[in-house]
Amino acid sequence: MAAGTASGTAVEVVDLATTPLRELNQRLHDLAGGKEGPTHWRVLNPRGAHAVACGLDAEIDIEIDGHVGYYCAGMNQLANVCVHGSASTGLAENMMSGTVVIEGSVSQSAGASAHGGLLVVHGDAAARCGISMKGVDIVVRGSVGHLSGFMAQSGSLVVCGDAGEALGDSLYEARIYVRGEIAGLGADCVEKELRAEHVAQVRGLLERAGFDDVDPSSFRRYGSARELYSFKIDNAY
Amino acid sequence: MTIFDEQAQWRPGLRESYLFDRNAIAEIQRAAREGIYDIRGFGAKRRVPHFDDLLLLGASISRYPLEGYRERCDTNVVLGSRFASKPIELKIPVTIAGMSFGALSAPAKEALGRGASEVGTATTTGDGGMTAEEREHSQTLVYQLLPSRYGMNPDDLRKADAIEVVVGQGAKPGGGGMLLGHKISDRVAAMRDLPQGIDQRSACRHPDWTGPDDLEIKIGELRELTDWEKPIFVKVGATRTYYDVQLAVKARADVIVVDGMQGGTAATQDVFIEHVGIPTMPAVRLAVDALEELGLHRQVQLIVSGGIRSGADVAKALALGADAVSIGTAALVAMGDNSPEFEQEYRKLGSSAGFYDDWQAGRDPAGISTQDDELSGRFDPVLAGHKLANYLRVLNLETQTLARACGKSHVHNLEPEDLVALTIEAAAMARVPLAGTDWIPGVGEHGS
Amino acid sequence: MCGIVGLFAKSPAIEESLGRHLAAMLAQMSARGPDSAGVAVYRNPVTSGSKLTLYSRDTLYDWDALCGQLDGAFGGATVPSVRASHAVVLVEADAAEAEVWVRRNFPDLRVMSAGSVIEIYKEVGRPEVFSEQFSLADFQGTHVLGHTRMATESRVTTEGSHPFSTGLDLCLVHNGSLSNHNRLRRTLQRDGIEFHTENDTEVAAGYLAWKLREGASLEQALEEGIEDLDGFYTFAVATADGFAVLRDPIACKPAVLAETDDWVAMASEYHAIAVLPGADDARVWEPEPGIVYVWEKAAV
């Protein structure tokens, strides 16, 4: 085990170059329900492996050194995950609580169908960021790709950079805030007035994300026009 | 006068068009009034080739039957033996298909659990998540992962006995879920994270994977999430079934569920139900061909659904090579759907017992496909569970009766050679000979 | 469905070890594509005449006899290498002419590629086995494309494997599934393009060949493909000078690019890139949908 942090907590180091992923995930799963075990973990050499640290259900901190593949931190509960690298599809998909922070960029469907917790992307997110989100808060320092916020039901998506085509297509009650350019709005997604309570919400999210240098009042707010909420002649498709 | 008598009134000179019959005309008139497609429940209603067009060859001189009761005819099925450390064991080869809480009332889901558990089989959640009632009353519960991901969470994932990745269903292969506003009650809305009273639209593709190569990675994640304990099923609506089954196998599924075009739905466009997908009977054959070609028949299990009504349907599906069948519509009927005791109320809704398919409307007098508290309050889950259990027992007994007549000590020993066809279409689709002949259309004289 | 890998050397060291890296990348993609594998290697350009790669189902095929016939017909032919079921043939003739001659006179052989520098090898079976059979690790060259296949709607055959050669020194690999390829195939057939499989990728390859024949540049052809080809795809196309990557506008199929001072790499999943030297410090990014990305030797 490596030397501890400033608080004296020991860090459990697992090297995926020599340890099977199954073993890492099993050890992490065994901590569920408040069981005894290391609370600080460091994972080395993920080298694009899939499903790293998925299904966590404990108040632990994990740092992952390198790029991960698909579904890293999938269905995360309670844990704090930090990826020092980039991620492929589905980072933090269906997360329930806890935080996932990634220093690099993410591929598609980051935070897909996530119910809670906080996802922070320091780089860019690709297409479908926050697709089908159900309560998660997502903050992206860079830009997001097309169809971000597609069918987003609840929660918040804050984009400090630009957004791609069809932003918020078929949006329900989730809130989308974008600071940069928008390539295009999706069906039923409209710009809405940014009021004091929204600025406060964005400020709070930016603070939690650690992006203190971004001005919360420089965003525009997007929400559902609610025209698709009932099947009507004009929107049957 | 019953609704049949009314329809039978005929006068000289009245000749109905085949193309523009009363249903076609009524639908055009409805479309002209409402300006939107017809959304309804139930499965395909028009006649397509089905198991009725196949017959079993019972024993006589060349084969010997088994005595009922004393000589065993086993019906147990193991699902998930390929990769899961905790496969599922069923006592009978019939399971309850996925039907959502939302489409069905909570007491209905409870009753399904009770009935299935009474006879030792499984139920399946639906496009809305796992209810506490169903988990509590269902001894073996399969948890569906659908494109919408409504209610999906890791705690329920771990409480489940198996996980079913739903690519599609037979009523609408390529379509997504649908639940209309009157059925989005407080509880349904909360479970699905939607505003109350809206018309729910579901995505038709999964949010975080598309294609069998990425499905394989998703299945890998599900296994990691559940520590490789639980069987992973993949469900498809029957279309290009041969390829779909091969791909699901390559994506490393444990069990494949194939739902033929006759499969039921709670709410889908009528044109989708009637005109997309292939019938269950050829789908079974295609699926088994795919598994046999990969050398994995029986090792990757096959469950088929879509129009299973009696033990004859079960036996024939098993003879074609399925490991088990699943029922949806039949289970609801067993529990009281379309029962004649509600005829007066069906009439008020513009329908009649045996015809009622407006399950999307949420006004079901039987209290099954509704979220209305008054209507669902009429539904007694204990009684309904028992009726379902009775029906499941009958299905099983009928299957055993037919299997014994064919000399089988396990229902899985039924094989295609125990079948003949009554029609050319059925012979070609099931790849069994036309009764009384050696002829299988499309197959050469010396085999395929 | 499938896995794609591509590697473009920017330094002599990588050119020398190109095959070794290709084999390592391909192995990482075997889960996505367990049915068959194929590679297009760009190496040993001819100074005169042309190069063909030929395939025979008969593993004991008499390539020398074929060589003799070619020599007789064109006044110069050699078979510098045979790997498993494939042979590289050099002939003193225009590539298109030589290809037509082989197809006409040896219908039992399959012309896998034709040009001045390209060599295509493809076979059914697991990628690891393929790598061994074809001694991939030996290859040196300027760039390679590789593909591992999970057949969706057509049979698993050698001919159905990717890369598909679309023209001289040109090839295509595909991850995804097209939805309008059947009608498009018939249209292209009426315009003289030949097809040998039921495969959707072959139609995309034929479409590119047709566009190029009509005078489009590779970039234009791919851009027009965005309109004309319906379905989901990540395409990687290689030419004598480099390669191109295109994702359809909906972009459900994955793609990742990476670059260092020594190489540019492309793959369906990052862990195929992770095996390359210096991958940890590479610039890694995802190509945007609906945009044609091109790398060429002159520009790099």
Image (spheres, rainbow, N blue to C red):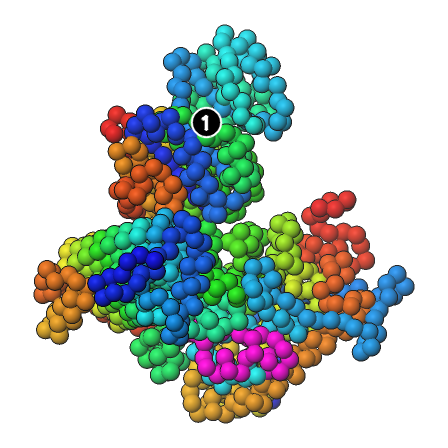
**In screen coordinates, is B280 left or right of A28?**
right
Disc 1 marks which amino acid? Answer: Asp
Range of the magenta residues?
B115-141
Instruction: Give the total number of marks visible in the rendering.
Output: 1
Residue lying at the far right of the rendered structure: B61
Label 1 environment density (alpha carbons within 10 Å; few <14, some 14–19, many ≥20): few
Chain of the residue displaying label 1: C
Residue B235 vs A20, above or below: the answer is: below
Q: Which of B18 and B413 is in front in this view?
A: B413
Residue A99 vs B294, above or below: the answer is: below
Residue B370 vs A231, above or below: the answer is: below
Q: In which quarter of the image is residue B445?
A: top right
Query: Percent x, y for residue A9?
Result: 28, 65
Residue C170 visible in the snapshot: no
Q: Quadrant of residue A37?
A: bottom left
Residue shown at 27% from the left, 42% from the top: C281
Residue shown at 45% from the left, 54% from the top: A20
Pointer 1 residue: C138
Q: Secondary structure beneath disc 1?
A: helix
Residue B99 visible in the snapshot: yes
Q: Which of C172 and C143 is in front in this view?
A: C143
Query: Percent x, y for residue A106?
Result: 29, 53
**Magenta stretch: includes residue B129:** yes
**In screen coordinates, is C55 left or right of A9?**
right
**Magenta stretch: includes residue A147:** no
Residue shown at 56% from the left, 64% from the top: B85
**In screen coordinates, is C153 left or right of A107?**
right
